[in-house]
């Protein structure tokens, strides 16, 4: 049985990696991401292009923390090299929906014939484009892209009506 848990992850080509304390800074073609890992028993080291994640304990929670940090680093590497894109589809059968992007907000107008527009917040450094009946949400940070897509989907949630009939809204259809 091992006395410690060690994992290593290698940064892909074209990715610049810096570590200061518990803060990891990853930069690449699609942008720059900074994340601080506050797990108490965790040690991070950078050796060349590899990040070493280790802990002296063999407890289950510490192993989970090591794997969590490894998954976050993999997502950061993927984000700065390829980026993340969520595709949403605008669906309506009663009233035609108009979607506009204004600054850090997405305005959904004429949803179910309502006079006031519904508003969804854009989180962080995320790009939102409206192309016909599709909305493309893209960016380098997986969490920010996913949260923005969910905010748009949640803004068009239908209340107090039969959901089998009123299926209008913006729905996430693809994640890449």
Image (cartoon, rainbow, N blue to C red):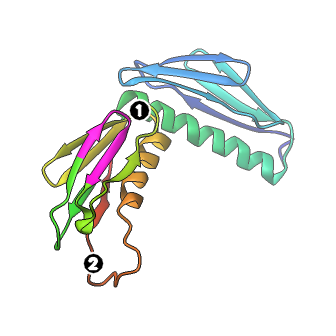
Residue 61 in the image, given as x and y percentages of width and height: 79, 51
58 to the left or right of 139: right
Sequence-wise, the earlier of marks 2 and 1 is 1
Against 119, is 27 above or below?
Answer: above
Q: Which mark is residue 111?
A: none
Q: Who's the residue at 24% across and 49% down the image? A: 135
As helix, strand or loop, the secondary structure at mark 2 comes to: loop
Specify whether residue 105 is painted magenta. Answer: yes
What is the C-alpha distance between the residues marked 2 and 1?
Answer: 34 Å
Give the extent of the magenta segment.
Answer: 100-108
74 to the left or right of 68: left
* Nearer to the camera, 165 or 69: 165
Which residue lies under the disc numbered 2?
166
Which residue lies under the disc numbered 1?
140
Q: Main secondary structure of the magenta part?
A: strand
Residue 158 in the image, given as x and y percentages of width and height: 37, 72
Specify whether residue 92 is painted magenta. Answer: no
Against 79, is 57 above or below?
Answer: below
């Amino acid at each position: 049985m091992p006395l410690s848990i060690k994992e290593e992850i290698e940064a892909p080509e074209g990715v610049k990696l810096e570590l200061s304390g518990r803060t990891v800074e990853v930069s690449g073609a699609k942008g720059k991401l900074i994340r601080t890992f506050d797990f108490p028993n965790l040690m991070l080291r950078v050796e060349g292009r590899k990040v070493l994640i280790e802990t002296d304990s063999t407890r289950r929670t510490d192993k989970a923390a090591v794997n969590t940090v490894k998954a976050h680093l993999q997502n950061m590497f993927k984000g700065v090299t390829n980026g993340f894109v969520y595709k949403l589809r605008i669906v309506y059968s009663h009233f035609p929906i108009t979607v506009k992007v204004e600054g850090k907000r997405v305005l959904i107008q004429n949803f179910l014939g309502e006079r006031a527009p519904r508003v969804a917040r854009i989180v962080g450094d995320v790009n939102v484009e409206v192309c016909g009946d599709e909305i493309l949400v893209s960016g380098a940070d997986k969490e920010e892209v996913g949260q923005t897509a969910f905010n748009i989907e949640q803004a068009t949630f239908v209340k107090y009506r039969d959901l089998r009939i009123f299926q209008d809204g913006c729905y996430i259809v693809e994640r890449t």
